[in-house]
Image (cartoon, rainbow, N blue to C red):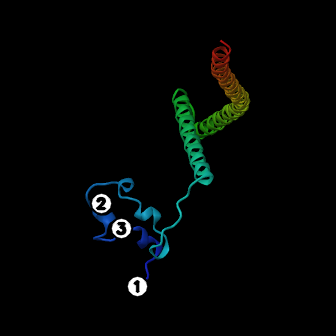
Amino acid sequence: MSSRIGPEEHRRPVVGSASAASAQQGQGPAQQGTARQVAGRNGQEAPAPVGAEAVQGIRRLEGYLLFASRREEARRGADRLADQLPWLTSGQREDLTRVYVRDRMALYRDVNASLVERAAELRAEYTERYRLLRRRCVAAAAGAVVVAMVVAAALTLLLQALDGGAGGGGAAGAGSG
């Protein structure tokens, strides 16, 4: 008997381990921590999927689940339709269900394709609007900075002129009289 642990045993919680204890305490897999999710071979941490690959995987999973729910919805609709036609033989009922589901799924694909196309159009439109708005905001901010600098420079020159004119005018008036 070998002391090596196969992939099946590696994933199972070991009696007395933290994951086994949390499973016994009624916690589900999501609450058991990340030890099983992160642990790689030889107890080293495996890199967690992050970034674009994870997002793409989640989107594919969502798409699959949506497609599966639509297929089940179409099957239920086909069953309701077939129930309204009690004279159908079992072979005719199966054909009706198959054709109905196929047509309904084609409709779902067409609707989904048009939604994806429209979403891309809206994304492009709003991206362009955002770009223009950002350009306007940057221009307005730059203009405000320039105006503030001009006003500050004008005030500085005005204060220097008043200080220089009052001090110089007062001394000149006092010296001549």
* Residue at the left extreme, as displayed: 25
Query: Gap between marks 1 and 2, in whole Å?
Result: 26 Å
**Which label was assigned to residue 89?**
none
Q: Residue at x 59, y 37 (%)?
A: 97
Badge 2 element: helix
- Residue depth check, mark 1 versus mark 2: number of the one nearer the observer: 2
Q: Which residue matches tag 3?
A: 13
- Say which amino acid is labelled 2: Ser
Vertical side of 28 occupied by 166: above or below: above
Mark sitting earlier along the chain (1/2): 1
Q: Residues within 10 Å of mark 1 (few under 14, many from 20)?
A: few
**Which label was assigned to residue 3?**
1
Residue 30 in the figure: left or right of residue 106: left
Query: Gap between marks 3 and 2, in whole Å?
Result: 10 Å
| Quarter of the figure with the C terminus | top right
Q: Residue at x 42, y 72 (%)?
A: 10
Q: Nearer the viewer, residue 94 or 146?
A: 146
- Say which amino acid is labelled 1: Ser
Residue 105 in the figure: left or right of residue 17: right
Vertical side of 62 occupied by 135: above or below: above
Mark sitting earlier along the chain (3/2): 3
**Which label was assigned to residue 22?**
2
Query: How many numbered discs?
Result: 3
Residue 16 in the figure: left or right of residue 101: left
The image position of residue 9, as x and y in percent, is 41, 73
- Say which amino acid is labelled 3: Pro
Q: Say if mark 3 contacts mark 2, CB within 8 Å.
A: no
Vertical side of 93 occupied by 40: above or below: below
Vertical side of 177 occupied by 122: above or below: below
Q: Say if mark 3 contacts mark 1, CB within 8 Å.
A: no
Q: Nearer the viewer, residue 8 or 104?
A: 8
